[in-house]
Amino acid sequence: MAFKATSLPWAQLLILAVVRLAEPIGYSQIFPYVNEMMERLHVTDDPANIGYYSGLVESSFSLAQLLTIYQWSKLSDRIGRKPVIIMGLAGVALSSFCFGLSTSFMGALVSRSLSGMLCGNIAVLWSMLSEITDSTNQGTVFPLFGAVWAMGTVIGPMIGGDLSDPAERYPDTFGKYQFLRDYPYFLPCALSSCITLGSIILCFLFVNETLPKIVEAREAQRNSTPPNASNPGYGSIIGNTTPAVPRSSNIDHSVVINPDSSTGVQESSNSGNEEVSMSLWEVLYYPKVPSMLISTSMLSFLAVGFDVMFVLFSYTGIDLGGLGRSPQQIGLALSASGLLGAFGSVLVFPWLQRTFNNRKMFSFLMAMWILAYLFAPIASIIVRLSHNNATVSWLGVVLILVPARIGLLCLPLSMIIVKASAPSKELLGTTFGLQQTTNSFARAVSPAFVSSLYAISIDHREILNGNVEWLIMVLISIYGVFISSRVRDVEPATPKAGDSHGNVSNGLDGEVEA
């Protein structure tokens, strides 16, 4: 039976999208110049070892975030989403500013770590989106915010690639400023900080709180009625609207599954104003959670690892098996592919999610990482045989980046899985925080692992002609496809058989298998 998707608060979504844009800009603007920065800081005399140090700097963000993101998410379940997002944006602005002033490897490392430590926004934002969507419209909204990240990774590398070392590159305009000669990477970092400050102001003035207990309490105060005594309204978790009852020893207040929930998360039998509480270990061992964490972490490991290896591979000279591209060319390539990914998320994913078996689609998209890693050494051979022909070089870049951007369509689908795995609406932020904690671990390990692997492969080119790193990543990608196949029955929302009210399924008909 046909059903109509729930209407969306587009004005609020647009504001959240603009606020969201600041973080990927700050995160990605260092990519085009980080290797050059490590050379200028004289961290090593061997160019082949630059990858070790740039990988450590890139990993420090996720490693620091690993230690704090769960706590930020849990805090947002208590005090609200909005204040936590504002604090996270302030951390991003401060760390970007400090990174631009770094004159040592340790200074760059600490500044980058500060950004991860002070920002848990990614988990909090996905919690907000889950609270203002249901299974009829999440397939439209989730990829939109994946596209926002992609757009940020377009703008970020453009800023980093075009504005790094401005005194040398634009001497007529910036050459007279000694400050920019002393701090050649300050300008892109300062611009990134200003963008983030603008997002803080926008968030403070226009973003609405979505945490259900706060929304319901404010609504009750306006209407002078007890919370949950009436329909909770759009943006809340639709479930049992029975009036609150006093808590007593003979009433079961445990978390139960409401099969009619249109949101994809479990309902709580606590219909009063009290919170459902589960310990970290109880959430971690909730039936759907463990394998959800494994599958989404594998995706993060492969995606982040590819970004790092692509930058290293592109920056490495052709004689060492790379593409020999400049920071500006790397920034252009990343920006163009990010734009492609953004359009793919917005225009293609909603149709795919509605049309195809989502479990099979998840595995198919994960398989794109096999091709992305496999095509890199092939592209290097083609460029070398063409004697570094410019057209052939760019075709090699396209050959590598296209399957990677297709593979990133897994990201919005993985967020649907996370939402469906939450034990209850009260623990939505906690669940996203736990997922982002494990993903942060994957994102922290991946850059250091792949950059070290890349450096070792260059040092030992006698083994597979220096292509050991690509072989290992192809094998890991194959394992990632196997893990993704353990997700079963991730289907688009459809009306339930025999349901005259047009209720829809939760979008994850079944569990993520262990």
Image (cartoon, rainbow, N blue to C red):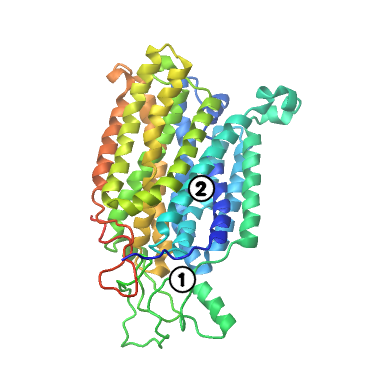
Q: Is residue 116 left or right of residue 413?
A: right
Tell me which amino acid carries mark 2: Val
Q: Is residue 178 left or right of residue 448?
A: right
Q: Nearer the viewer, residue 493 or 239?
A: 493
* Residue 6 location, quadrant: bottom left
Name the one closer to the observer, 300 or 186: 300
**Mark 1 and 2 residues: CB-CB less than 8 Å, in contact?**
no
C-alpha separation, residue under disc 1 versus residue under disc 2: 24 Å
SS for callout 2: helix
Q: Which residue is mark 2?
A: 148
Residue at point 42% right, 60% down?
137
What percent of the width, then of the height, locates residue 292? 31, 54
Of residues 422 and 180, the one nearer the viewer is 422
The residue at 55%/30% (across/down) is 33
* Residue 15 position by quadrant: bottom right
Task: Name the residue carrying label 1.
Answer: 236
Q: Look at 41% across and 32% down and name the residue there.
A: 401
Residue 324, image x, y percentages: 47, 19
At label 1, counting other C-alpha atoms closer than 10 Å, the crowd grade (few under 14, some 14-19, many 20 or more) is: many
Q: Residue furthest front?
A: 2
Q: Is residue 163 above or below residue 21?
A: above
Vertical placement of 287 versus 233: above or below?
Answer: above
Percent coordinates x, y for residue 285 in the rendering: 29, 62
Residue 438 shows up from this direction = no
Q: Quadrant of the N terminus?
A: bottom left
Q: Earlier in the sequence, mark 1 or mark 2?
A: 2
Query: Quadrant location of residue 500?
Result: bottom left
Report helix, strand or loop for mark 1: loop
Q: Is residue 378 visible?
A: yes
**Residue at the (44%, 46%) spot, across then down:** 347
